[in-house]
Amino acid sequence: GAGVSQSPSNKVTEKGKDVELRCDPISGHTALYWYRQSLGQGLEFLIYFQGNSAPDKSGLPSDRFSAERTGGSVSTLTIQRTQQEDSAVYLCASSSYREAFFGQGTRLTVV
Amino acid sequence: AQSVTQPDIHITVSEGASLELRCNYSYGATPYLFWYVQSPGQGLQLLLKYFSGDTLVQGIKGFEAEFKRSQSSFNLRKPSVHWSDAAEYFCAVGPNSGYSTLTFGKGTMLLVSP
């Protein structure tokens, strides 16, 4: 596609439910990132995929968070048993060489 | 570990005035440096980047930034601010070899007064 696409754009979920956030990167980009943006906290790195290498999961805040990237393209970020502190905007980015292109984000609200 | 500091959380500038947003980084070698802008409800858009060479880089929308190795800084400037520049600005640093993540600062919110 022309850009990084994320879905849904907004998600409201009840505390304790699982959610899946989807990211369609730019075709041909080998790297894919997930970041979380909370008010006043900047961008918090979550996970990074590069080609066929093992993902860098060092930013995942707890074992309730997981992500996969199927076929080197689409990625899904899953949050299990959501908590109110998970409320944030989740941003996905892809890159082919250094420059990262961001999607519009998914605003997650846990009520 | 790499880190980015944007010391100003908010800055207010009059329309037509000049702008400088500060960014300091911590990195063990020469990094790749970026400035992104985020308008409300939008994703991040790349303004400019520094990889190597000329330390003064030009970007989109009339922005420029200067890499100063001795000061570990990469400040963003614009000679004349327009109301449409009101947004949040993020500085980011990445490694200049291999593939790895970008580390972002906490952002500076730019407000433009008439």
Image (cartoon, rainbow, N blue to C red):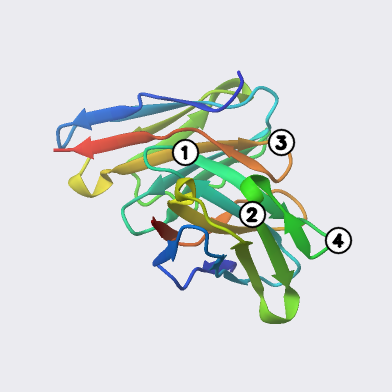
Q: Pointer 3: what residue?
A: A96
Which image quadrant is residue A81 in?
Answer: top left
Amino acid carrying label 4: it is Gly
Distance between the Cα atoms at labels 1 and 2?
A: 19 Å
Q: Same chain for the residues at labels 4 and 2, yes or no?
A: yes
Q: Report the residue at 66% width, 38% height from top.
A: A53
Q: Position of residue A84 (x, y in %)?
A: 19, 46
Q: Nearer the viewer, mark 3 or mark 2?
A: 2
Answer yes or no: is residue B88 visible: yes
Amino acid carrying label 2: it is Phe
Residue A73's place in the image compared with A91, above or below, is: above
- The crowd level at tag 1 (other Cα within 10 Å; few <14, some 14-19, many 20+) is many
Q: Same chain for the residues at labels 3 and 2, yes or no?
A: no
Distance between the Cα atoms at labels 3 and 4?
A: 21 Å
Question: Tag 2 or tag 4, which sits nearer the N-term?
Answer: 4
Answer yes or no: is residue A55 visible: no
Q: Pointer 2: what residue?
A: B63
Between A91 and B84, the one nearer to me in the picture: B84
Residue A106's place in the image compared with A87, above or below, is: above
Q: Pointer 1: what residue?
A: B43
SS assignment at label 1: loop
Horizontal side of residue B59 vs A108, given as left or right: right
Q: Position of residue B39 (x, y in %)?
A: 43, 43
Q: Report the residue at 55% width, 37% height from top.
A: A93
Distance between the Cα atoms at labels 4 and 2?
A: 18 Å
Horizontal side of residue A82 vs B73, given as left or right: left
Q: Chain of mark 3?
A: A
Distance between the Cα atoms at labels 1 and 4?
A: 29 Å
